[in-house]
Image (spheres, rainbow, N blue to C red):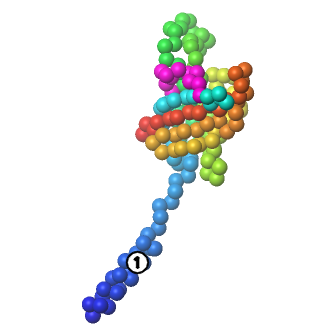
Amino acid sequence: MKRCFAFLLAFALLLWPLTIKPAEAQSLKDQLVGSWSLVSNTEEYADGKKEPWGPDAKGMLVFDKNGQFSLQIGVGDRPKGSGNPAENPAGKFIGYFGTYVTNDADKTLSFQIVRATFPSWDGTEQKRAVTSVGDQLIYKSAAPIPSGKGPFVPVLVWKRQN
């Protein structure tokens, strides 16, 4: 009897892991929802990395569950402005908002920009390759960006706030 019980117990313990369903992996979109603060914003060139926004850049990125986003980044030590702040911004600053979509298969994030502080971005789509998401979100431009200094790839690192 003891032998039979021991056999059944051992058999049940072997089968038990098969009855537990693994937790379903969250979609990329679900992982992005929340607010994020900027950790770093670098540009990768063929000859190395540059930090054009400086070490004191601050930023915030928010994704909601309905597919809306808002992003702002500004440098530190901006000069005080005067007059109408909407018409006379001071210092290096970028902001844009709109909708976003994700692709789990290729781990991409696409911003559909409605309005931006850089008007040429209004109505455009910008695709990003997500390299990491968890307590930190890291993404980079899906393609190099041409510039007078040569093509570069911006890489942004964000820290989860919630």
Estimate the x, y position of residue 53 in percent, counting from the top left: 56, 21
- Left or right of 113: which side holds 162? left
The quarter of the picture where residue 67 lies is top right
Residue 143: x percent and y percent? 70, 36
Percent position of residue 88, x then y: 60, 10
Q: Residue furthest bottom?
A: 1
The quadrant in which the N terminus is found is: bottom left
In the rendered image of this protein, does residue 134 appear above or below residue 117? below
Mark 1, secondary structure of its residue: helix
Q: Is residue 5 above or below residue 46?
A: below
Q: Nearer the viewer, residue 46 or 10?
A: 46
Q: Residue at x 70, y 33 (%)?
A: 144
Q: Amino acid at mark 1?
A: Leu
Residue visible at 53% across and 20% down?
A: 54
Q: Residue drawn at (67%, 39%), measured in percent from left and top?
A: 142
Check if residue 58 falls in the magenta segment.
yes
Question: Front-most of 25 and 69?
Answer: 25
Q: Is residue 126 above or below residue 106?
A: above
Nearest the viewer among 40 and 161 is 40
Give the overall secondary structure of the magenta segment.
loop
- Name, please, the residue furthest toward the top: 82
Does residue 24 appear in the picture of this structure?
A: yes
Given residues 154 and 16, the one toward you in this image is: 154
Residue 112: x, y in percent?
A: 66, 36
Residue at 56% across, 24% down:
51
Asked whether 136 falls inside the magenta stretch, the response is: no
Region rendered in magenta: 49-59
Which residue bears the numbered disc 1?
14
> Badge 1 local density, few (<14 within 10 Å), some, or many (20+)?
few
